[in-house]
Amino acid sequence: MDAGDEAPTDTHCPYCALQCGMALTPAGGTVDVAPRSFPANGGGLCQKGWTSASLLDSPARLTTPLVRTGGELHPATWDDALDVIAARLTALQAEHGHDAVAVFGGGGLTNEKAYLLGKFARVALGTAQIDYNGRFCMSSAAAAGKAAFGADRGMPFPMTDLADADVIVLVGSNPAETMPPFLQHLQGAAARGGLVVVDPRRTPTAEQANVHLAPAPGTDLALALGVLHATVAEGLLDGTYVAGRTAGFDEMWRTVARYWPEHVERITGVSAADQRALAHRLAGARGAYVLTARGAEQHATGVDTVSAWINVALAHGLPGRAGSGYGCLTGQGNGQGGREHGQKADQLPGYRALADPAAREHVAGVWGVDPDSLPAPGRSAYELLDALGEPDGPKAMLVFGSNVAVSAPRSQRVADRLGALDFLVTADVVLSETAAMADVVLPVTQWAEEDGTMTNLEGRVLLRRKAIDPPDEVRSDLDVLAGLAERLGQPAGRFPADPEAIFTELRAASAGGVADYSGVTYERLRDGEALHWPVPATDHPGTPRLFLDAFAHDDGRARFVAVDHTGPAEPPDAEFPLQATTGRVLQHYQSGAQTRAVPELAGAVPEAHIEVHPDTAARAGLGAGDRATVESRRGAVTAPVRCVASMRPDVVFVPFHFPGGQRANLITNPALDPTSRMPEFKVCAARIVPAADVPAGTVSAPGSRTSDRQDKDGES
Ligand code: SF4
C-alpha cells in the first residue's frame, strides 16, 4: 500500500521479537493502530504495541539534524551534518588509524540496516571496532545453541507448535510483561498442568504457572544439573535418543554425577523433590519444550547456563523431534536477524565467521572488495564501550538504534567513556540519554515510515511496510550510511539506500551461509509466505523446523556440553549481603528511550521502583513507598520501595528502563561470559538503605558530555 493511501497497511509492531501483526491506517500525520491476525500474536497486542503510533508525531521526536557548537546542540542542514561527520572521521582516522572510529548497532535495526552497518564499518571505515547491543541480550544462547546443535536459531520451530505441548519449562523468562500475546502459546501446557517457570522472582508469568521454581539468583545452572542428575538417577534418560542422535554424554555426566538433588537444593533453594518432579514431568510428557531467555543468559556463566538446560532437553530427547524441542526466546525486535548479518564484532552476513577465509572471500566478492582489506574481528560490546577514549581505544563512535548510556552495564563508567570521546554521533528518533551527549544527532525514520525486513524469534523473515511518509527533515539510517559512504570516498552505488536493493544484496551475501536468505524476496513476503530460514532458493518453501533429520554438526549429532556450577561472579558478603537483579515492566521497552516518550506508558509507570520482601525492607528501616537506595560496588540507584511478599528475602529487583539516578545499570556487574562476552546483568552483590542515609556524592550522576565538550573547547 502506498504512503498516503487511506487503506490499512499490514505490518508488524516496532518493539519486541514477537513482532505482532498490526495494521496501520494513516490518520493526519500519524497512524491508527489495529491488531491483525498473525500466528505470533493471534490478533492480540500489548499496551506498547497499541500505543506505538504516539511516537510518530510526538513532541519528543527529533525532526532536524543537530550539531554541537559552543557546547550546545544546534539545528543544522543534512549536508552540513554529514559533512561535519565525514570530515571528523577522516581526520581522526588519518591521525590514529582505522580503528579510531567505532560503530555500535542495535537489535532493533532491520536486517537491511544491520547488514549495511556491518558493510559500512568494514568497507567504508575499514574499522574492526563494531558491535551491537544484542551482545547484551542473546549472545549466550547463540553460543550455546551453536555448540549443541551446530547452528543457532532462537526457536528452531514455529511458536504455534507450543500449543500442543504437555510440558513447557520457561527458564528466566517473563513474557507476561515482555510479550503478553506470547502467553497464548503456553495456555495448552498450562491447561494440562505442565507450565513450569524457573525464576527467582514470582513474576506475573510465574503467577500463571502450574509450578514455580525460585532458585537463588545465579544458580539456575546448578538447578539444571540437579534435574539432569535426577533424570539419570531415576531411570528417565531417553537412552535411544542419546545413543542415536547425540555425542558427549559421558563427559557431561562426569560433572553432573556430583550434583545429586539434595546437594543442588542447598545451592539453589529448590527442593530435591521439586527437581525430581520436574525430571518426571519431562519424561512423562507426550510433547515438551525447554525455553530459556535473559534470566538464564545474562550471567558471566550465561553460555554454560544455557548449555546446562539444553543438556536437560537432550537427556529427554526433545530437540530435533516434532512436537518437542529447545528454544531461546529472543527479546529485541530484530534480535534474531540482527545477530545474523554482520553487525557483530566477529561476523559477516549469513551468520558467517569473519575469521573464516572462505566466508571473507564470498562476502568480499559480493561487496566488490579485496578479502584482505576486511578487518579482523574486533572488541565485543562492553569491551568496546570500556575502551572509548582510552589511549588504545576508539576516539569516535557512531551509534545507530541504541541507548548505551542507560542500557550498558556499569553505566556510569560507560557514560564517562562516551564523554571522553573526541567525537560522538547518534542516529535516533528521540534525544535519548546517549544522543544528548553526542556531537551530531541525526533524526531518523521510524518503523511506520520505511520498508524493511525483520526476523522474529522463530526465524521467520517478515516485511515491515511503510504506511506514511516521514517528517520532511527525517531520513532513514540507510540514507545516512549512503550519504556518509559517498563522503568517505566510496564509489557510487556501493552503498544503496533503497531497502529492497539492499535486501537483494544481503540475499547474495548470505547465500550458502547458515542463515541463508537467498530464496527470500520482498515479493514472496508481500504475498504473505511464511519463510523461516534457511531459504536457499526462490522456489524453496523455507525451513520452519530445523534438525528433524540431523543436527548441523558434521556428524549430524547434537552435543552434550560438560558444564559446572560456579555461581555469581560477585557473591554476597557482609558488606553487600543482598543480590540485586534487573528486569522489565510491561509498559517499557529496553532503555525506555521510546516508551518513556509515550504519554500513556510514561503515565502508567513514570519511574523505577525497588522491589523487595517486606521483611528485608523492614530490616533496612523501610516501608512501602519510601525512597531507598540500592548500592553495589559500582554505584547506587534510588527509587521508591515496593514491598512484595513473594520476593526472596535475599533479593532486590530494579527495572532497567529509567535514566539518571534511576539507572539500574549504575549497579550492575560488567563481568563477562568468557565465550559470549555477555555481561552479568542479572546478579550482583548489593545492599539497601533509606535514600536519606546515602552520604552525599554516593549516588552517581548521569554522565555529561556537554560539560566535557565545553572543557575541551576551553582547553583548545
Ligand atoms: S508483544 Fe511485543 S511485538 Fe507484540 S505488541 Fe507488545 S511489544 Fe509489540
Image (tube, rainbow, N blue to C red):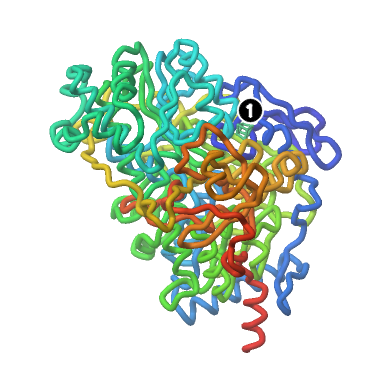
Of residues 579 and 368, which is closer to you in this image?
Answer: 579
Using the image, determine if residue 246 lies above or below residue 385.
Answer: above
Q: Residue at x 28, y 36 (%)?
A: 148
Q: Quadrant of the C terminus?
A: bottom right
Q: Residue at x 33, y 54 (%)?
A: 361
Position of residue 92 measured from the top left corner of the image (x, y, whole percent)? 52, 78
Residue position for label 1:
21
Position of residue 220 measured from the top left corner of the image (x, y, whole percent)? 36, 37
In the figure, residue 539 lies in which quadrant?
A: top left
Position of residue 303 measured from the top left corner of the image (x, y, whole percent)? 33, 44
Of residues 106 and 328, which is closer to you in this image?
Answer: 328
Of residues 278 and 312, which is closer to you in this image?
Answer: 278
Position of residue 500 measured from the top left corner of the image (x, y, whole percent)? 59, 42
Seen from this angle, which residue lies furthest right?
28
Q: At label 1, which amino acid type do we have?
A: Gly
Secondary structure at badge 1 equals strand
Is residue 609 shown to the viewer in this render? yes
700 left or right of 599 in image: left
In the figure, residue 312 lies in which quadrant?
A: top left
Q: Dot 1, how many residues are within 10 Å of its Cα: few (below 14), some (14-19), or many (20+)?
A: many
Q: Quadrant of the N terminus?
A: top right
Using the image, determine if residue 427 lies above or below residue 218.
Answer: below
Q: Looking at the image, in which quadrant does ligand 1 appear?
A: top right
18 left or right of 274 in image: right
Seen from this angle, which residue lies furthest bottom?
716
Using the image, determine if residue 477 lies above or below residue 589.
Answer: below
Q: Residue at x 67, y 73 (%)?
A: 706
> For the residue with label 1, is its CB less than 8 Å from the closest atom of ligand 1?
no
